[in-house]
Image (cartoon, rainbow, N blue to C red):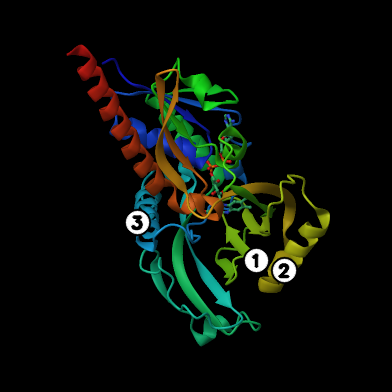
Amino acid sequence: MAAPKVAVVGAGVIGLSTALCIVETCPSCSVTVLSEQFSPNTTSDVAAGMLIPHTYPGTPIHVQKQWFKETFTYLFAISNSAEASEAGIHLVSGWQVFKNTPKEELPFWSDVVLGFRPMSEAELQKFPQHQFGQAFTTLKCDCPPYLLWLEKRLKATGVQMYTRKVTDLWELHSEYNIVVNCTGIGAHQLVGDKKLFPVRGQVLKVHAPWVKNFIRDGDGITYIYPGIHRVTIGGTREKENWNLSPDPGTTKDIFDRCCSLEPSLQGAQDIKVKVGLRPSRQCVRLQREVLSQGGVKLLVVHNYGHGSGGFSVHRGTAKEAARLVRECIAALQGASSRAKL
Ligand code: FAD
């Protein structure tokens, strides 16, 4: 059969990394990315991009750990290469602090990040309202640079990218053999997934170059994540809230909460407010589906619903989606050889 034509719908971190994994593992495919928006206008551009996993209650922990490990290993190699600065990937050390000692002292990802340990008394003195803490080094993606780096790599391998809103996956059946759905919160409308819901997040991106360590309050709502050029401070988690407009009261609340963790942020300059909708679900939808109309079939692979942790697991889920695409190709090749007999 001719080279299978694959359309990846969506150009956030999930769509771009999935397209790259498909190109890397199925070189015979012709891959096209179709998306309503590209960087800097995706949810992925709003994210802090820290590699600290969020837990998906509907996915076995060993699977989540594997996704995180694959992502960490992939980005760690980039952070150690000459590409690091252009890709916006860097190591960052810091503290996760708790007002009360958590029941689970060791998160499942503690042996994937580097140097995970309880904080010392001397370190805890910086946080008089907290009684327990964990110190570790992890990776951070500076989001627009990382997305642009992924786009550049895709273009270098001949992948075409087009701005296009897809209103029904079936509309692609005459042009493509396989469609990969990486539309994030867009899947709510595109495939009518009622299990998918937005968790609104508002963050501030500020100029505060003296802040070098991350600080995360144990509940994950208040955080300070330094990037290469700007510090992301946050945040909010508002379930089922679709509002993309920044709220000034929330901006003040975020700023006050972060200053109580790191008082020097009072001197932060050039504050920009961003809002994004986390595509949330009990588990990531990572599965094959066959659409069929009048005897004609379209093979679909879904890869969406990464909620608060898309950056932390993107490479692991992209690899799994690429494996599902290879299964689809094998099914198409099987059907094509049967037709010739
Ligand atoms: P998106 O980035 O939303 O991409 C979806 C793409 O699909 C877009 O290009 C869109 O235009 C396109 N699309 C949608 N519908 C259609 C359609 N019908 N036709 C064509 N194209 C379509 N995660 C972490 O791991 N670490 C963090 O520190 C972190 N911080 C965060 C902070 C905030 C404030 C927020 C909001 C999120 C954060 N996240 C973090 C979560 C992370 O941002 C998401 O999990 C991730 O960006 C989801 O990526 P995505 O590619 O699925 O979605």
| Pointer 3 residue | 66
Which of pointers 2 and 3 indicates the residue nearer the eye? 3
Q: Quadrant of the C terminus?
A: top left
Residue 208 at least partly seen: no
Q: Where is residue 95 shown, x and y percent of the image?
A: 53, 71
The residue shown at (77%, 64%) is 253
Numbered badge on residue 222: 1
Marks 1 and 2, how far apart at CA: 7 Å
Q: Where is residue 104 shown, x and y percent of the image?
A: 46, 77
The residue shown at (57%, 72%) is 218
Q: Quadrant of the N terminus?
A: top left
Position of 249 relative to 191 (above/below)? below
| Pointer 2 residue | 257
In the picture provided, is 22 more to the left or to the right than 141? left
Q: Where is residue 316 shown, x and y percent of the image?
A: 38, 48
Q: Quadrant of residue 68?
A: bottom left
Q: Are marks 3 and 1 in contact (CB under 8 Å)?
A: no
Please name the amino acid that badge 1 sits on.
Thr
- Of callouts 1 and 2, which one flags the residue occurring earlier in the amino acid sequence? 1
Q: Quadrant of residue 323?
A: top left
